[in-house]
Image: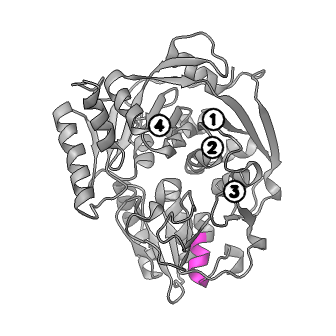
Amino acid sequence: MNIAEKLLANASGMDEVKPGQFINCKLSVVLANDITAPLAIEAFGEMGATKVFDPERVTLVADHSTPNKDIKSAMNTKLMRDFSREQGIIHFYEGCGGGIEHIILPDKGIVLPGDVVIGADSHTCTYGAIGAFATGVGSTDAGAGMALGESWFRVPESMKFVFTGECRPWVTGKDLILYTIGQIGVDGARYRAMEFAGPVIEALPMHERFTMCNMAIEAGGKTGLIAPDATTLAWVEPRAGRPFEAFESDADAEYVEVYEWDAGDLEPQVSFPHLPENSKPISEVGDITIDQVVIGACTNGRLEDLQAATEILGGRKVAPGIRCIVLPGSHEIHLEATRMGIVETLLEAGCLVSTPTCGPCLGGHMGVLAAGERAVATTNRNFVGRMGHTESEVYLASPYVAAASALLGKIAGPDDL
């Protein structure tokens, strides 16, 4: 079996599972946020449930509209807060100690290798970077999962993406996944597990692995997976508060498709509106002026991402008229970035450094675009109207490209400086 099949077999109590098979799995964690949790809590009550299956295994995070941007978001967060108190849920996060859900769950050791996780948010697939089978579901399924501690799955087919060679300067995991989506399309992995492997993946630091698995859903993937290795275990073990089991694919595991690319052939990538599959190498972008840059989100809001931006922005100034918004991924990341002088460097460069939030990624707040405006963002989606007005445009890129673009006022790479 491959890693996806092993994870599902383990959670279902079966020795073996095969693609297409319907199974029930015990859930390690159930997640919802300030947009999806109210609906999940409503479904939880409508099915007659009175207690969550395990108050240590349900996690509720206020991140999409936090700090509360209006009365409705305040009421949603209050509903989550009250439900958490009523149920004795330990892992409820807002404000201090909180942050963006897909950053804080691995960071706090809530999700671990070997877990099967459902979250009422499509980017739950992020946790595949530590070897968990994690996938997004609707709020009704999340509500049922909170009550029952289990959920049904159709075992997905798996695709394997092997990266060989060595990455060029400025090429990151964000560029690898944008290139991948560009090659197979936004439906190229529909209801399939995307397994990333090869020497380039093995050399990636954890923050870039999270970025790659985060965007598996942008290719239609059921989940993205990287088998745990020494790098994973060194990252996970200090955070783990419970036992875990790491799985890897068998040498003779079967895949519906296998792709192999030489990373040395790749430049930094930019995905053009209005689909992530519209990726182009930086050398083919042309002269495109911009109005806004967003650095952060669940895709690229980790400390190392802020360090990458600082590497480009340090000692320089954001171009006149450009709004460069930086959103650390969690309260802890914000604090550490402050201690390290990263926040000061970004502020001196002319950036706006704000509290952790999903905010502008979904056109919620903290950076909504007007008609005719363009943004370069380290976020994961650039659909029509994703960051604001339907006549605005979002270009997806890495922190390196985003920072360089902020300095030049147009889409650019670090080498253009």
Q: Relative to residue 304, is residue 177 drawn left or right? A: right
Under mark 3, the amino acid is Glu
Q: Earlier in the sequence, mark 1 or mark 3?
A: 1
List x then y, in percent, for residue 127: 51, 39
Label 2, label 4: how many angstroms apart (C-alpha)? 13 Å
Q: Is residue 358 visible?
A: yes
- Which of the 4 quarters of the picture holds residue 74? bottom left
Asked if marks 4 and 3 touch (Cβ < 8 Å), the reply is no
* Residue holding disc 1: 191
Label 1, label 2: how many angstroms apart (C-alpha)? 6 Å
* Residue holding disc 2: 220
Q: Main secondary structure of the magenta part?
A: helix
Depth check: give the residue in front, 330 or 123: 123
- Which of the 4 quarters of the picture holds residue 3? top right
Q: Which mark is residue 58?
A: none
Asked if marks 1 and 2 touch (Cβ < 8 Å), the reply is yes
Q: Earlier in the sequence, mark 1 or mark 2?
A: 1
List x then y, in percent, for residue 11: 50, 19
